[in-house]
Image: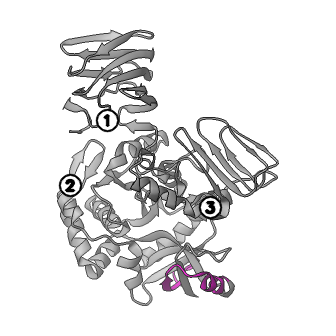
């Protein structure tokens, strides 16, 4: 049986600010281990049970962070079957429809396992066994989801009411799916917990590709038509497949649950209870809950010192964080922001994000370190009429041939060898050597070596915004 993992890379994770940003959302973060959440999702079905063949993952991602998605897969030694790029977000039902169209276009009709890229599972082997059972149900025509046994009256999740066990196919662990339930108030959540018949909605779905396409055509023909038009207009761009922008932008937004799962008839949907240490890590308190703790109930990452502190989550990414005499607190440090919250009010971080958006602050959009297809840069200092950047260019990578109307640049090579184009000149710079790029002069930076190139760039001028770039040639399809 062929299993096609589908990784849905949408979502922004605003309640995990300041680590999660619009241009670097939570699925790209390493929060619970050595891998990012995206990488962990791509690795989750490795070592599938006997009888299942697991294909390379198929990703649906926003084009804004396409290069870092591809790079993270490469770092995890995972080759993607395809990376489909959405020009705009339209929720999970259109994303899954694009994935199903691509799956059947390759001449197969696999069982799709649709997984959000921003979930954590501490026991992936349990998940793999559950997927095997779900795949057998999907082969028999069912639409399957996984439900998480609640351990608290959680009001932040949707619920699934389960019915009687399904006898065939044997040993799947599946139950009839009675209905989906919206996020309840606290009293109703306590009723669900006490009754034991309701599960948290995991947001993970399993079905045949052809079955999904038939269902979306029947239940939401407007979504199906828009996705077919967008896929028909797709264009290959390096490692990516860009779907038709105009057609997909016109597609209605809807979730897998609302568009199809909740509209299925009796006997078509199933739910499998899952005890795999699942969390959607919706806020910092959820990360604390699924993480290993010290004797005082603390979770720490990075350079952190604690004194008489308990029940606390403290994460440092660039400098020392010290906590003294605090209890049940969240402290998150990044190079450009520090957030401190009571752990039981961690969900309210979204209010800070909303205020940052209203005030037009850069901290809501991007980190100080910005990833590009050729490497990354870090704005380490900035003042009136100047900015200092640390730039790292990957081996063999090339920046665009460009010029600036409002700034000049000084480059100092710290490590590696740079090939520099400046006007009509082309020359090499080694460590401790420098050059000057006057305002208005065409220039390009390349790394011809086998090691990363690191330079310090000092910009000076009346305007230092990233939009002051005129590109003449670019290897990455940017205008």
The answer to whether residue 355 is left or right of residue 333 is left
Determine which residue is flagged by label 2. 234
Q: Residue furthest front?
A: 384
The answer to whether residue 276 is left or right of residue 337 is right
Mark 3 or 1: the one toward you: 1
Q: Which residues are magenta?
A: 167-193
Location of residue 364 in the rendering, given as x and y in whole percent from the top left corner: 44, 50
- Of the numbered discs 1 and 2, the one sitting upstream in the chain is 2
Q: Secondary structure at mark 2?
A: loop
Query: Label 3 neighbourhood size at 10 Å, few (<14), some (14-19), many (20+)?
Result: some
Question: Going 56% across and 69% down the picture, which residue do you hit?
Answer: 130
Location of residue 238 in the rendering, given as x and y in whole percent from the top left corner: 27, 41
Q: Is 98 inside the magenta-drawn segment? A: no
Location of residue 416 with respect to 254 vertically, above or below: above
Determine which residue is flagged by label 3. 286
Q: Quadrant for residue 71, please give it.
A: top left
Determine which residue is flagged by label 1. 465
The quadrant in which the C terminus is found is top left
Question: Going 60% across and 61% down the picture, which residue do you hit?
Answer: 346
- Of the numbered discs 3 and 1, the one sitting upstream in the chain is 3
> Which of the two residues, 51 or 275, is positioned nearer the viewer here?
275
Location of residue 132 with respect to 384 vertically, above or below: below
Location of residue 310 with respect to 104 vertically, above or below: above
The answer to whether the residue labelled 1 contacts the one labelled 2, judged by CB atoms less than 8 Å apart, is no
């Amino acid at each position: 049986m062929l299993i096609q993992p589908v990784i849905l890379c949408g979502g922004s994770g605003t309640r995990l600010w300041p680590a999660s940003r619009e241009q670097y959302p939570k699925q790209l973060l390493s929060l619970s281990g050595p891998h990012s959440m995206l990488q962990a999702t791509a690795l989750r079905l490795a070592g599938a049970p006997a009888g299942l063949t697991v294909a390379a993952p198929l990703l649906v991602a926003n084009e804004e962070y396409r290069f870092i998605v591809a790079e993270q897969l490469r770092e995890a030694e995972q080759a993607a079957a395809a990376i489909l790029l959405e020009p705009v977000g339209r929720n999970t039902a259109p994303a899954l429809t694009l994935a199903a169209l691509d799956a059947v276009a390759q001449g197969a009709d696999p069982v799709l396992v649709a997984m959000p890229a921003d979930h954590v599972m501490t026991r992936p082997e349990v998940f793999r066994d559950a997927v095997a059972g779900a795949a057998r149900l999907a082969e028999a025509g069912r639409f399957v989801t996984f439900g998480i046994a609640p351990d608290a009256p959680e009001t932040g999740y949707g619920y699934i009411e389960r019915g009687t066990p399904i006898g065939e196919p044997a040993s799947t662990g599946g139950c009839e799916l009675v209905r989906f339930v919206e996020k309840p108030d606290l009293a109703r959540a306590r009723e669900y917990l006490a009754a034991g018949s309701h599960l948290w909605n995991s947001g993970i779905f399993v079905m045949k590709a052809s079955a999904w396409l038939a269902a979306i055509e029947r239940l939401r023909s407007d979504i199906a038509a828009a996705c077919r038009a967008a896929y028909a207009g797709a264009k290959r761009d390096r490692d990516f497949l860009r779907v038709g922008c105009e057609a997909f932008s016109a597609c209605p937004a809807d979730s897998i649950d609302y568009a199809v799962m909740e509209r299925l008839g009796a006997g078509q949907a199933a739910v499998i209870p899952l005890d795999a240490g699942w969390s959607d890590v919706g806020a910092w308190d959820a990360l604390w809950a699924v993480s290993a703790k010290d004797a005082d109930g603390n979770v720490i990452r990075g350079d952190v010192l604690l004194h008489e502190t308990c029940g606390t989550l403290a994460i440092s990414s660039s400098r020392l964080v010290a906590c003294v005499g605090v209890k049940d607190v969240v402290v998150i440090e990044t190079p450009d922001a520090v957030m401190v919250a009571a752990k039981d009010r961690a969900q309210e971080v979204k209010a800070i994000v909303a205020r940052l958006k209203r005030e037009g602050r850069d901290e809501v959009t991007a980190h100080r370190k910005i990833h590009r297809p050729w490497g990354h840069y870090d704005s380490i200092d900035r003042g009136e009429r100047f900015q200092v950047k640390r730039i790292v260019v990957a081996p063999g990578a090339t920046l665009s041939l460009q010029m600036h109307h409002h700034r000049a640049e000084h480059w100092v090579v710290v490590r590696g060898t740079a090939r520099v184009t400046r006007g009509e000149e082309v020359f090499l710079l080694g460590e401790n050597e420098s050059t000057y790029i006057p305002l208005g002069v065409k220039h390009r930076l390349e790394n011809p070596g086998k090691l990363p190139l690191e330079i310090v760039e000092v910009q000076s001028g009346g305007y230092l915004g990233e939009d002051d770039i005129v590109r003449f040639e670019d290897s990455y399809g940017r205008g």
